[in-house]
């Protein structure tokens, strides 16, 4: 067996598109996803799971119907399940999300075999 760490910068250098999470690892039924974001995303919620955002580079905002939070490099925020939110970054921001396998970033949940976010890099 080969024991190698996962290097975030190396993985992030493999893609340029925004709002397209890439799976870099799994732990039990959870996936670790890297994503580059810029601009606005859509309003959505996740009825069955919390969602974790960890900012690796840059800064982002998460808007809620009753407020907002700014998350900077080296910080994280957990959106509770069922809370409608919309993410935004003025400049390109690199983040990691931790979610159960099969969760789709727009709030829709699909089966493990058809989940559109299960793109490994």
Image: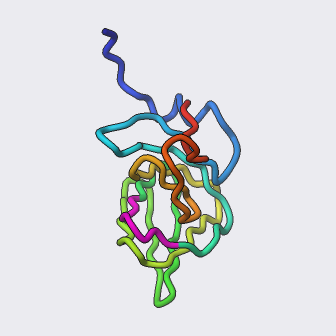
At 64% from the left and 67% from the top, the residue drawn is 41
In the rendered image, which quarter contains the C terminus? top right
Q: Quadrant of residue 7?
A: top left
At 49% from the left and 44% from the top, the residue drawn is 112
Indicate the colouring scheme. rainbow
Locate residue 58, reporting x and y percent. Answer: 53, 55
Residue extending farthest to the bottom is: 66
In the rendered image of this protein, does residue 67 appear above or below residue 78? below
At 44% from the left and 61% from the top, the residue drawn is 72
Locate residue 56, reporting x and y percent. Answer: 45, 48
At 64% from the left and 71% from the top, the residue drawn is 42
Locate residue 57, reporting x and y percent. Answer: 50, 50
Q: Quadrant of residue 37?
A: bottom right
The residue segment tinted magenta is 45-52
In the rendered image, which quarter contains the N terminus? top left
The answer to whether 78 appears left or right of 57 in the picture is left
The answer to whether 2 appears left or right of 13 in the picture is left
Taking depth in this image into account, of 24 and 45 the one nearest to the observer is 45
Residue 97 is inside the magenta segment: no
In the rendered image of this protein, does residue 73 appear above or below residue 2? below
Q: In which quarter of the image is residue 105?
A: bottom right
Taking depth in this image into account, of 31 and 16 the one nearest to the observer is 31
- Magenta stretch, main secondary structure class: loop
């Amino acid at each position: 067996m080969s024991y190698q760490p996962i290097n975030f910068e190396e993985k992030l250098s493999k893609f340029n598109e925004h709002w397209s999470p890439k799976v870099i690892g799994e732990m039990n039924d959870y996936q670790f996803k890297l994503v580059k974001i810029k601009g606005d995303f859509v309003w959505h919620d996740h009825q069955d799971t919390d969602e974790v955002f960890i900012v690796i580079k840059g800064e982002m905002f998460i808007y809620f119907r009753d407020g907002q939070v700014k998350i900077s490099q080296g910080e994280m925020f957990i959106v509770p399940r069922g809370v409608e939110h919309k993410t935004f970054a003025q400049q390109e921001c690199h983040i990691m999300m931790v979610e159960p396998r099969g969760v789709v970033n727009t709030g829709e949940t699909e089966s493990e075999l058809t989940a559109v976010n299960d793109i490994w890099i």
